[in-house]
Image (tube, rainbow, N blue to C red):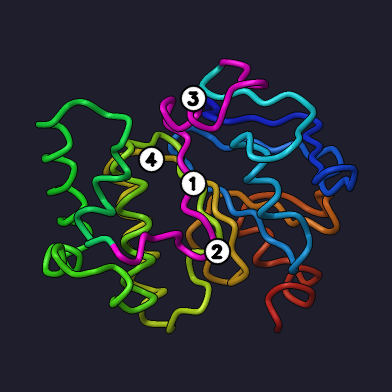
Amino acid sequence: MTAILEAKNLRAAYGDRPVIFGIDLVVPQGGIVALLGANGAGKTTTLRALLAQTRTWGEITYQGQRINGASTQDLVRMGMVMVPEGRGTFVDFTVEENLRLGAYSRRDGDGIRKDLERVYHYFPVLARRRNQRAGSMSGGEQQMLAIGRALMARPKLLLLDEPSLGLAPLIVQEIFQILTTINREEGVSMLLVEQDAVRALKVASYAYLLETGRVAMEGPAAQLAGSEDVRRAYLGY
């Protein structure tokens, strides 16, 4: 299968402190790949490195084009969009104002209006609250808003950082159902950082397990879910 994103010998650092040590990673076109590991394993740093948000070395290829040296803004325009941990919503803005900020670099008014309706289709609660201040919404609703805002940029690849963090199980289930629907209906590829390894391995086709900035294990998600070592170390049973 064709890769939308490929990293070879990816290394990253904060200042003089190395964090990622030579990761090889592939996200297939239209696929969902999970990036798992304990706190401090380097999952978020990997996403930041791919999106040019930290010092990075190695080769990164997106849609067949080497993107080393591209800015974060350039990558977003090319279709690489992150949904950050903590959601990053603008709490004093309304739902619709937040969504429109996701399309800040676009000038196609008709397309933006159509994409607003598309987001409201996936997240009906946002349609009902389009004029509500984002800061007054629940954590789950704000996570939906963060994903919706990312969709307004018309992503080809979504980088999702801990979308289940701090949310009730039923809300997490709803969000993951919507993500898999977006992947299936629109072909949006996804790289999913997630501490809920059980749920991530159910929706992903392939997974990488990070330990202290290195890939400790990788393989088809179903195969890793069935591994006794993985179950004991990451799945808790």
Is label 4 in contact with label 2 (beta carbons under 8 Å)? no
Q: Quadrant of the C terminus?
A: bottom right
* Magenta part of the chain: 65-92
Q: Nearer the viewer, mark 4 or mark 3?
A: 3
- Disc 1 secondary structure class: strand
Q: Could you tell which of marks 4 and 3 lies nearer the N-terminus?
A: 3
Q: Is residue 27 above or below residue 129?
A: above
Q: Which residue is at a point 49% across and 46% down the rendered structure image?
A: 82
- Disc 4 secondary structure class: loop
Q: Nearer the viewer, mark 4 or mark 1?
A: 1
What residue did someone put label 4 on?
188
What residue did someone put label 3 on?
74
Q: Is residue 91 above or below residue 156?
A: below
The spot of residue 17 in percent (x, y) is 89, 47
Q: Could you tell which of marks 4 and 2 lies nearer the N-terminus?
A: 2
Q: Is residue 237 above or below residue 39?
A: below
State left or right for residue 90 relative to residue 219.
left
The spot of residue 201 in percent (x, y) is 57, 62
What residue did someone put label 2 on?
162
In the rendered structure, which amino acid carries the disc numbered 1?
Met
Q: Could you tell which of marks 3 and 1 lies nearer the N-terminus?
A: 3
- Disc 3 secondary structure class: helix
Q: For the residues marked 4 and 1, what is the alpha-carbon distance in whole angstroms?
A: 13 Å
State left or right for residue 96 relative to residue 202.
left
Q: What mark, if any, has residue 82 been given in the picture?
A: 1
In the rendered structure, which amino acid carries the disc numbered 3?
Asp
In the rendered structure, which amino acid carries the disc numbered 4?
Val
